[in-house]
Amino acid sequence: MKVLDLQCRLGHVFEGWFASEDDYLGQKQRGLLQCPLCADDHIEKRLSAPRLNLGSRDVTEPAKAPVPSSAPAPTVADTKAESMALQAAWLSLARKIVAHTEDVGHHFAQEARRMHHGEVPERGIRGHATPDETVQLLEEGIAVLPLPLPEAAKETLQ
């Protein structure tokens, strides 16, 4: 099993698990790789640190005390952990949105207008609208929020 650090054009970093390098390349060539945060399909490998199993430390060896510092600088691991936590929070929010809204697809603008005019009961909807349709809805006083939902939010990740 190969665990690769991947990155989309927007700089989102995430892990991908593949059976082999050929599996990764095959999935990339077939367009199956997608950023779980923004759905970008332009995915590149990043350099990643190998996991080295060097054995455990001798228990008779005394542990070295950390050197105190007045203001420790954030490490790469700290930054990566923060980034991963933010990505996980965003994906969790996206899944909640999917779970509590109805996907009306490309009929979003029409359905939003129907709700606004009282033709159908109000409910949470999501779907696709062109930039022009979005501007028109806002000009009509219909509150909309463009929110790109990644495909990963619509299904369970393994």
Image (cartoon, rainbow, N blue to C red):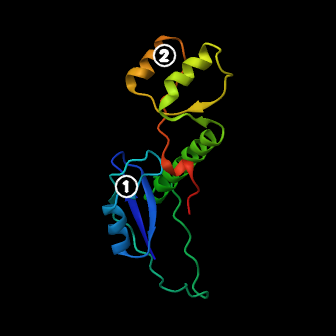
Task: Give the amino acid at mark 2.
Answer: Leu
Looking at the picture, tell me which residue is in the foreground, 19 or 51. 19
Q: Which mark is residue 138?
A: 2
Looking at the picture, tell me which residue is in the foreground, 118 or 134. 118
Res 48 visible? yes
Name the spot of residue 138 as percent of width and height, x first.
Answer: 48, 16
Identify residue for label 1: 7
Query: In this image, 42 relative to 148: left or right?
Result: left
Task: Assign a secondary structure to mark 1.
Answer: strand
Looking at the picture, tell me which residue is in the foreground, 72 or 108. 108
Name the spot of residue 35 as percent of width and height, x first.
Answer: 43, 52
Residue at coordinates 35% horizontally, 74% vertically from top-left? 21
Name the spot of residue 90 as percent of width and height, x first.
Answer: 55, 44
Q: Quarter-wise, where is residue 126 in the image?
A: top right
Res 72 visible? no
Is 111 drawn above or below residue 15 in the view shown? above
Task: Give the amino acid at mark 1.
Answer: Gln
Looking at the picture, tell me which residue is in the foreground, 4 or 106. 106
Residue at coordinates 34% horizontally, 61% vertically from top-left? 30
Nearer the viewer's eye, disc 2 or disc 1?
2
Residue farthest to the right, as pictured: 121
Is 49 drawn above or below residue 152 in the view shown? below
> Crowding near pointer 1: few (<14 within 10 Å), some, many (20+)?
many
Residue at coordinates 69% horizontally, 22% vertically from top-left? 121
Task: Assign a secondary structure to mark 2.
Answer: helix
